[in-house]
Image (cartoon, grey):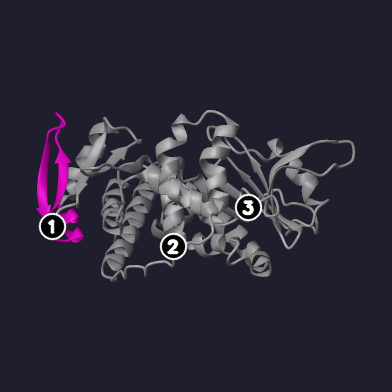
């Protein structure tokens, strides 16, 4: 499996299992160790590469531990602190990372609940861990632009200098993008005023602000939807070359075991065509609700697209396992009608029905 394929497989596992994981140890076993092994490529069974429960006594805090330390060339390079998958990541709950960062050679620290991965370094002051991450990876909503940066952390492609050099730009670009996303979801008065004063010549009164808050929100959603649709249409026009068969594996490591585990967990091979179809349905549906509420589950007989990861809220089904492909749409009584399609672009022709399905549940 290629790097991006392994990341997608783990994301599918997280999506399917996160709600069932209730403890920190279960989070480590189900999500964190597979990430270290299958995504980063370090052998979690080899203490020369991965040290669990890493201890480095600091001042009066004797015996305090960090969940994992990743070692390269005999030196600790990455520290990882874990929380349960159901918890919200708060830096005040990871004080060990702050203390250990200054007493080891590590330049990178990671705080994770197995779903969201926050990466830190020392941009603000040397040997002092920053209070804000320079990179945030959400496995339930992967930003594809971050994949090359994550790959630089892997054993095969580890490039610390490149990571640190790119960290400052990643930190601020990521923060700006998250702020833009927040404004798209719920425009602030400043955001509303910024656009209103450029299109409206009157005074920015309370009544005008109320009127344009909704207009700015609506325009933002439409713009975002158009951008997503344009990107998908462009992507669908690009041919995909099947990866060459990999060489036989002679040595068994945790990476190979983790990859096999991911394949067992997903059981069914999720195709690129199914994921592209899902993205089209998601792009259509996000005009009604937040995109992260639309998820997928690959079943044996069809590829399900659901609202809120709930089987009782099916938006659409993709039947792509036969020569003739079908888009399955369900009515209010959950009765499915299959519409034959010859290309993914034809899904756009059923946009109204998809939006109605989303509206019905939302």
- Relative to 130, residue 314 above or below: above
SS for callout 3: strand
Q: Nearer the viewer, residue 177 or 294?
A: 294
Determine contact: label 1, label 2, CB under 8 Å.
no
Image-based side of 322 in relation to 68, left or right: left
Alpha carbon separation for disc pair 2 and 3: 22 Å
115 in the magenta segment: no
Q: Is residue 66 above or below residue 160?
A: above
Is residue 331 in the magenta section? yes
Residue 107's spot in the image, x, y percent?
Answer: 73, 58
Tell me the quarter of the picture where residue 360 sits.
top left
Report crowding for label 1: few under 14, some 14 to 19, many 20 or more residues within 10 A (C-alpha). Answer: few
Q: Residue at x 53, y 32 (%)?
A: 86
Residue indicated by mark 2:
2
Q: Residue 277: which quarter of the image? A: bottom left
Sequence order check, earlier mark of 2 and 3:
2
**Which residues are drawn in magenta?**
323-349
Q: Position of residue 362 (x, y in %)?
A: 30, 33
Residue at 52%, 42% in the rendered image: 31
Q: Is residue 330 left or right of residue 132?
A: left
Q: Nearer the viewer, mark 2 or mark 3?
A: 2
Residue underneath mark 1: 323
The x, y position of residue 99, in whole percent, is 80, 45
Residue 30: x %, y % from top left: 51, 39
Query: Is residue 237 something one can see in this rendering?
Result: yes
Give the residue number, with chain letter if any, for mark 3: 119
Q: Are marks 3 and 1 in contact (CB under 8 Å)?
A: no
Up-down relation of residue 226 to residue 318 (above or below):
below
Residue furthest front as drawn: 250
Going from N to C along the chain, the mark reached first, 3 or 1, is 3
**CA separation, marks 1 and 2?**
26 Å
């Amino acid at each position: 499996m290629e790097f991006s394929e392994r990341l997608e497989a783990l994301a599918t596992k997280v999506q399917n299992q996160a709600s069932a994981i209730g403890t920190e140890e279960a989070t480590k076993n189900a999500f964190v160790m597979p990430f270290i092994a299958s995504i980063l490529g370090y052998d979690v069974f080899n203490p020369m590469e991965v040290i669990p429960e890493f201890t480095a006594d600091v001042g009066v805090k004797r015996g305090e531990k960090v969940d994992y330390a990743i070692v390269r060339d005999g030196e600790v390079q990455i520290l990882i602190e874990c929380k349960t998958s159901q918890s919200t990541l708060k830096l005040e709950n990871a004080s060990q990372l702050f203390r250990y960062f200054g007493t080891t050679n590590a330049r990178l620290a990671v705080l994770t609940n197995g779903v969201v991965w926050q990466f830190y370094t020392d941009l603000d002051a040397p040997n002092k861990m920053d209070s804000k991450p320079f990179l945030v990876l959400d496995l339930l909503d992967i930003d594809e632009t971050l994949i090359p940066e994550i790959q630089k952390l892997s054993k095969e492609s580890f490039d610390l200098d490149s990571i640190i050099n790119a960290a400052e730009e990643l930190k601020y670009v990521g923060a700006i993008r998250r702020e833009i996303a927040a404004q798209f979801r719920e425009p602030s008065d400043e955001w509303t005023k910024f656009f209103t004063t450029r299109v409206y010549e009157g005074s920015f009164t309370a009544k005008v602000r109320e009127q344009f808050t909704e207009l700015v929100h609506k325009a933002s959603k439409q713009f975002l939807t158009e951008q997503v649709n344009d990107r998908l249409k462009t992507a669908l026009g690009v041919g995909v070359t099947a990866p060459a068969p990999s060489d036989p594996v002679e040595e068994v490591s945790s990476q190979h075991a983790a990859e096999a585990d991911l394949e067992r967990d997903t059981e069914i091979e999720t195709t690129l065509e199914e994921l592209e179809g899902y993205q089209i349905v998601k792009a259509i549906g996000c005009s009604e609700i937040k995109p992260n509420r639309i998820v997928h589950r690959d079943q044996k007989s069809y590829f399900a697209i659901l609202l809120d990861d709930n089987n009782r809220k099916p938006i659409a089904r993709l039947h792509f396992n036969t020569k003739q492909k079908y888009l399955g749409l369900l009515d209010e009584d959950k009765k499915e009608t299959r519409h034959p399609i010859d290309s993914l672009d034809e899904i756009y022709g059923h946009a109204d029905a998809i939006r109605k399905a989303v509206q019905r549940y939302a």
